[in-house]
Image: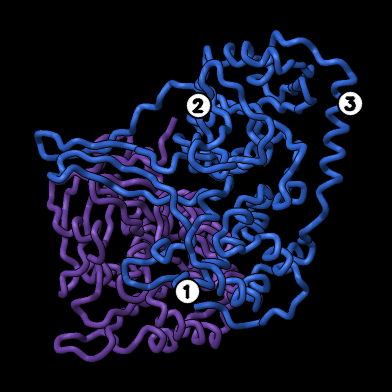
Amino acid sequence: MLNPYLPYPVRITDVRVETEDKTLRTFEFEFLNPKDAKAFDYHPGQFAELSIPGVGESPIGIASSPTEGDRLLFTVFRAGSVTGRLHGMQVGDVMGVRGPMGNWYPLDAHEGKNITIIAGGYAVTTLRATMVWLQDPKNRDRFGSIDFIYGARTPGMLLYRDEMAAWQKTGGVNCHITVDREFPGWTGLTGFVPTVTEQVAPNPNNAIALVCGPPIMIKFTQPVLDKCGWKADQIYLSLENRMKCGIGICGRCNVGHQYVCKDGPVFSKAELDQLPVEY
Amino acid sequence: MQHRILSKDSLAAFLEGLRKEHVVYAPKRDKKVPNKMVWKILEPGESPLFEFANTDMSPKDFVFPQSECLMRFRTGEDGTSVLKPIEPEPRKTLLFNVRPCDGKGLSFMDMIFCQDEQTNDVYWRDKRERTLMVGLACNNPCPSCFCHEANCGPHSETGLDVLMTDLGTRLLLKPLTDRGATLVDGLPEAAPGDVDRAEELKGTVEASMKPVIRTEHLEARSLMDAYNLPYWDRVCEACINCGTCTFVCPTCHCFDIQDETTPDGEEGRRVRNWDFCMSPLFTLHTSGHNPRGKKMARVRQRFMHKYKYIPMKRNGEVGCVGCGRCVRLCPVNIDIRDVINAMNAPAEAKPEGQEV
C-alpha cells in the first residue's frame, strides 16, 4: 500500500544562487531510486513537500517541467526552519520529496487558445515550468500566441534571467520582462507589472491568463485585465497557505470548502470570487 | 443477517471469547472523577456498564491517536538519513459498548482519511481495519444530545460491526458486517418478539428527542452569505479558543506533523499530533501573514467547516454526529445548537465585507 506521508529519497545534484540578495536558490534533485522518478508523474503548477528528516517539510512549487526529464527543480526562498536548513545544504546531500501534490494549470483543457502569463517576484517558479512545457516541440503547436509578462524589483532579483533571454531569442513566445525602475546596464522594460500589462494589453479573445505574484501585484493587475475585457473564468491564480499533510486531510489550508493542497493550488478567479479571502 | 440474543448472565463467557483475538475496551467509571466515563481495557472478570451516558473523550484515538509516530530515521555512516515508515502493530482492538454517535463518527472520518487513491491514509486505514466496534443503542439520551438531527440517531448503525439493544436482562445483538456476524456466531437466534421490542425502544427514544436545530435556510444560503453573517462577531466574544470542543469531538480530525530528534540529531521520528483550528498558529505562514489571524475567523471556521463546508463537499453530510460533547464540556457554555440555529436564521447578511 502506498504511504502518502513517505517522501521519496532524492540527492541534490545542483545548487544555484538565483538572486543578488542570495535569498533564493534553485535546487536540482535526482531520485535515488529510478522507479520513484517514474511514479512522480507531474504537471506544471503542481507542488511538492520538500522533506528534511529531523527538521520537517515545506510545500514548494515545482519549477521544472516534466518535459525536461527526471530531475526536479525547486526555487526556494529562505524563510523558515526547513528552507533555512535547505539553503545550507550542498550538492550530494540526500533529503526527501513528497508529491506531486495538488491540481495544475488547465492547459490541456484550453488547447488551441492564446496564453498570457503574468508573474511577479519569486511566484514565477511554477510559471517557469509552464513556459518550458509550452515551448516543448510536443506542445508548442497546440497553443496560439504566448505572452509572458514578468517583473522583479531589480535586474538582480529576476529569476531564470538567462533562460528567459533564450526564450525571447527562439522567437516562439513574447517575453515582456520588467524591473521596477531604471538600472545601469538594464536595457529592458521598466515599470511595475500592472503598468506593463496595460502596455501589452493582452487580448482576451480565445485566451486564458495565468497570474502569479504578490497580493499587491494581483490587486493592481486585475483592473487592467478587467479593462482589457477579461472574464473571471479566463483567469487562473495559484494560492499558497500553510500546509502539513498536502493531501486534503489535516485541515489548515482550506479556503472555504476547498483545500488549497488538494483542490488547488490553482483556482480560477471565478471560483475565488465565491470563496472567503482566507489566504 | 440474523439477530442474536445474549443474556447478561452469559456476558462473561461471551467477552472471554472476544478476548481470544482482541484486546477488549469498554467505557468504565473513572476512579478519580465521579461520573466521568473513560475508555479502558475491560479486564477478565469485569462486567461492562450499561447505564451510562457517554465517555468524555470519543474513541477516535483508537484509530487516530492523539500522538502517533509515522516514521523514523537514523543517520547512516555516509551522513545521510532516510525516513522509514513504522511497522504497524498486529494487535486487534474491540470496542465494546460504543455509542452509535461514535460509530458514526469513525465512519464519517473514513470519508476524510480515505478519499481516493492519492488521499489514502494508511495509518488510519490500518488501525480502522483492526478495530471492531460493538455498539450499544441509547435508550436514555442526554439533554445535550441531538444525534437524530445530525444524520445519526440513538440507534444508528453506521460504522458499527454489531449493534446491541439493552432489553433489561438480555441484549439483542444485530450483526451489521461480516466481522460482526463472526463475533456473534454461536449465540442463540433472537425471537421475533425481541426484535419488535428493540424497534419499540428505538421508536420511543427517537420520539423523546425533541427537534432543536433547523438547517433549511443554512443549506440554501450561499457559502459567502453564511460566512458574512453578523452573528460571528457575537459568538466569538465568549470563546476562549481553548480547543476543548475539537479534542472531545468524534469528527474533528485536524492534525499537525512535527519532527522530533535526539539532541545530537542523529536519530529522530516524524509524528503527527492532534491540532485544532482554534489555535492562531494553525494557519500562520512563515512570513507572518495569517489567513485566520483573528479569533472570530477561527471560531467561524469550526462551525462553518462542520455545517457548511463539509455538506458542500460531501453531498450534504455534516461534520457532526450530534453527540453533544462540545455542549457539555465547553468551559464558556457555547452551545453548537444555538450556533447552528443562528447560522440558519434568516438574518440580513452583509453582501460585501470579506474578512482579510
Question: Can residue A27 be seen here?
Answer: yes
The chain letter for the residue carrying disc 1 is: B
Q: Which chain is blue?
A: B
Question: Can residue A260 be seen here?
Answer: no
Q: In this figure, which residue is indicated by the disc labeled 3?
A: B196
Instruction: Using the image, tell me which numbered label, if any, was put on residue A8.
Output: none
Q: Amino acid at mark 1?
A: Lys
Q: Secondary structure at mark 2?
A: strand
Instruction: Using the image, tell me which numbered label, if any, was put on residue B41.
Output: 2
What is the total number of numbered labels drawn onto the structure image? 3
Which x, y percent locates residue B194? 85, 21
Which x, y percent locates residue A140? 42, 60
From the viewer's perspective, tell me whether residue B48 is left or right of residue B268.
Answer: right
Image-quadrant location for residue B12: top right
From the viewer's perspective, tell me whether residue B74 is left or right of residue B29.
Answer: left
Q: In this figure, which residue is indicated by the disc labeled 1?
A: B294
In this view, the residue farthest toward the left is B77
| Residue at x-position 59% and y-position 59% | B305
Return the residue nearer the eye: A246 or B319: B319
The chain letter for the residue carrying disc 2 is: B
Relative vertical location of residue A84 with respect to residue A276 in this rendering, above or below: above
Q: Which chain is purple?
A: A
Q: Secondary structure at mark 3?
A: helix
Q: Secondary structure at mark 1?
A: loop
| Residue at x-position 66% and y-position 26% | B161
Relative vertical location of residue B307 with respect to residue B6 in this rendering, above or below: below
Residues flagged by tags 2 and 3 on a common chain: yes
Return the residue nearer the eye: A85 or B296: B296
Relative vertical location of residue A278 with respect to residue A129 in this rendering, above or below: below
Which badge, 2 or 3, comes first in the chain's sequence? 2
